[in-house]
Amino acid sequence: MNNQKLFFQKKGCETMKETISKVLEANLRDWNDWCWQMKQKSICSDFSNLSALGLISPDVKEQRRRVGLTPYNVKLLLYLKESDPQGYDAESLQSFLPSGKNDEEHQWAWARRHDLPSSRFWVRLPVPRFFKTLFTGRGSDTEIQTLEKMYPHTDVLIATAMCARHCSFCFREVGDARGEAARMTGSMNAVMNAVQAIIARKTPHVLVTGGDPLTRSNQQLCQMLAPLVESKTVQVLRLATRLVVDLPMRCYDEELLAMLRDFAQQMKRRHASFRIVTHINHPCELTLEAVKALENIQACGIEVMNQTAVLHGVNDDVATLRKLLMETDRLGVRNYKLFHSMPVKGTEKLRVPIRKFRELVSSLHQWLPGTSVPPANVVTLVGKMPVSPSGRWMFPIPFTNRILCRSFRGEWYLFKDIWDIGRHLREAMVLVTVVLILTVLPLAKLSDPVSENRTANQTQSITRVAMLADELGYPDAWARQRFAPFVEGNTLYLPLHGL
Ligand code: SF4
């Protein structure tokens, strides 16, 4: 992190275009002004400027989905390119959509469900609901504009479609007029209608997200958050923002900090919680600026929580995740969710297999204290699904209180558990089922008339052996069919093919 200090004293790249060069060498007053940073997005996201800086190849064509970078993001990319290739790879993967044939389509199935004719057609089909859910999930209720409801006690308010950076893995497809966030978000009037709806239906948990809500002005934020803070029904209010790492200057704004402090105190007085949820995926995002932003929020008495998406090529190795979780832990940020990257079309290259995701979670538990490792989830269209870190490595020994465990380092250990009646009942049921199957199958065989006949005759003594075809006068072709030897009277009949 100390190297990053040096970076911000560093002069701009000599070969860069004049306009972007001027932007990157702006004075500190402009640099620390988040509105100024947002205004420079069009210059900093221009492909020819980015290729002049050597951040993308000159052959890369404009993508259907826009890239969105602020001067701060560009400077970070330049710094990482020179000093930390691994960090640069991670940042560039998060900033630019990987090239591939799926670039044309960058959308999560979730977004499709509610506003496309095919979704409506599927919903109206006269097939059982279970069947529809199995294939399409249930998605979130979006009947009220800017409001989502996936869980019974949580409302999600889409405060805006605007973000500082357009993350390449994001399912909201921000910065694109066809994107989900853009379709869902409306004017401030629509947002305020949704706020009133949340209060009217007395939802206890509210998540304000977007886009990034902190890209709204202080006045607009106050307008939408104040009624929620004052409402006695809202018990936990979470404000989700990535500006802490994408545009930390937003959290240097004294007016914003004073407002957030006031909100936190108001909620605390009525025994409720106001939290900031951020989203950090790689340790390289924790620059000195980002750390200052985190500390400014914490100084307001607000708990900061972090969620991390596991992305291929960004952080899908134990060393990177361990470093990230340790750094956030050190900064007093509660890591509350580690999630498998969402199934967004066009971002398959950023996804890791579930098997690998589980292995990573298992490994993290071997390296870090429990307080540092957040619960792991897979996000589906029926909600979050927990991913067990331990299941793969624990084999219960039936009818004992012992469990055979294998550690990440490959060590085996016979763990002594307490007696678990529930487990033993299940084991007993499995055993009874197996015994029943093993006894019923032979009985079924015995009920076969040929077998019964054979068993009855086995009690008699055999005095004669005869060829089946000859003795009974069967034609050859028929006699050569598969017969088992059988006993009738005192004679053992053998089929011809058995000779
Ligand atoms: S900041 Fe959040 S909402 Fe915006 S693009 Fe990134 S992940 Fe998506």
Image (cartoon, rainbow, N blue to C red):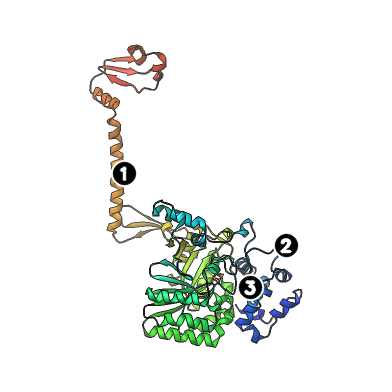
Q: Helix or strand or loop: what does disc 1 sit on?
A: helix
Would you say the residues marked 3 and 1 are in contact, meaning their CB atoms lie under 8 Å apart? no
Between disc 1 and disc 2, the foreground one is 2
Which quadrant: the N terminus? bottom right
Callout 1 crowding tier (Cα within 10 Å): few <14, some 14–19, many ≥20: few
Task: Tell me which amino acid carries mark 2.
Answer: Asp
Q: Is residue 322 or residue 356 the one in the foreground?
A: 356
Residue at which label 3 appears: 69
Between disc 3 and disc 1, the foreground one is 3
Measured in 3D between alpha carbons, the distance from the residue under mark 2 to the one under mark 3, in whole angstroms, is 19 Å
Residue 470 shows in the view: yes
Image mark count? 3
Callout 2 crowding tier (Cα within 10 Å): few <14, some 14–19, many ≥20: few
Residue at which label 2 appears: 59
Residue at which label 1 appears: 434
For ligand 1, give the image quadrant. bottom right
The x and y percentages for residue 117 are 51, 57
Q: Helix or strand or loop: what does disc 3 sit on?
A: loop
Q: On the picture, is 320 further left or further right than 43?
A: left
Task: Tell me which amino acid carries mark 1.
Answer: Val
Q: Is residue 340 or residue 235 the one in the foreground?
A: 235
